[in-house]
Amino acid sequence: MENQPKVTDASNFADVASDKYFAEVVAWAEENVIVKRYDSDTYAPIDNTTREQLAAILYRYVSYKGYDVTAVNDFSAFLDAMSVSDWALISMKWAVEEGLITRITSSTLSPESNATRAQVAAMMMRFIENI
């Protein structure tokens, strides 16, 4: 979506080698605070991505672009609202309100579940079409 933006520095993640096909993208996303570290130097590029992690990435990207991120959902309809991690709370509230992340069952969001390929595709489609 950024048309191969220029990167000023290499990634500082110890587990993202500079010769990997995704190294520049990760460096750009880190530089623009769209992705964050697991710990002092780990990105974990082969780990699965959870639904709340994806919400956080999309939220940070929208913030980076300067779009409105004030819409929030109160989560009162979801039994697992308390399982949303503190660091992802605002992102998840925004993503649910914007319709990017939808419920798994009639009363659950499953924020800490790994996002399936189909879920990621649906979230990205909704993001591109609606944001």
Image (spheres, rainbow, N blue to C red):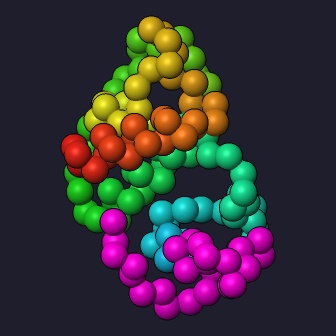
Q: Which residues are magenta?
A: 1-26
Question: Seen in the image, is 31 located left or right of residue 123?
Answer: right
Whether residue 113 is situated above or below residue 55 in the rendered picture: above
Q: Nearer the viewer, residue 56 or 44?
A: 44
Residue 67 image-quadrant placement: bottom left
Give the answer, above or below, for where 127 lies relative to 11: above
Q: Residue at x 49, y 91 (%)?
A: 8
Kindly identify the residue that appears in the image at 45 percent across and 73 percent down.
32
Measuring 41% from the left and 51% from the top, which residue is drawn there?
58
Q: Is residue 50 magenta?
A: no
Q: Is residue 85 left or right of residue 4?
A: right
Residue at the extreme bottom: 8
Please identify the quadrant where the N terminus is shown: bottom left
Q: Quadrant of residue 71?
A: top left
Q: Is residue 125 above or below residue 63?
A: above
Residue found at x 41% / y 11%: 77
Q: Position of residue 110 (x, y in %)?
A: 57, 24
Question: Is residue 121 visible in this depiction of the protein?
Answer: yes
Secondary structure mainly formed by the magenta segment? loop
Task: Between residue 128 and residue 85, name the one nearer to us.
Answer: 128
Work out whether 65 lies above or below 50.
below
Count of picture labels: 0
Q: Which percent across, then down, holds residue 13?
A: 71, 74
Q: Give coordinates of residue 29: x percent, y percent.
A: 50, 70
Is 3 covered by the magenta stretch?
yes
| Residue 84 visible in the current orientation | no
Is 86 left, or right, of 98 in this rendering? right
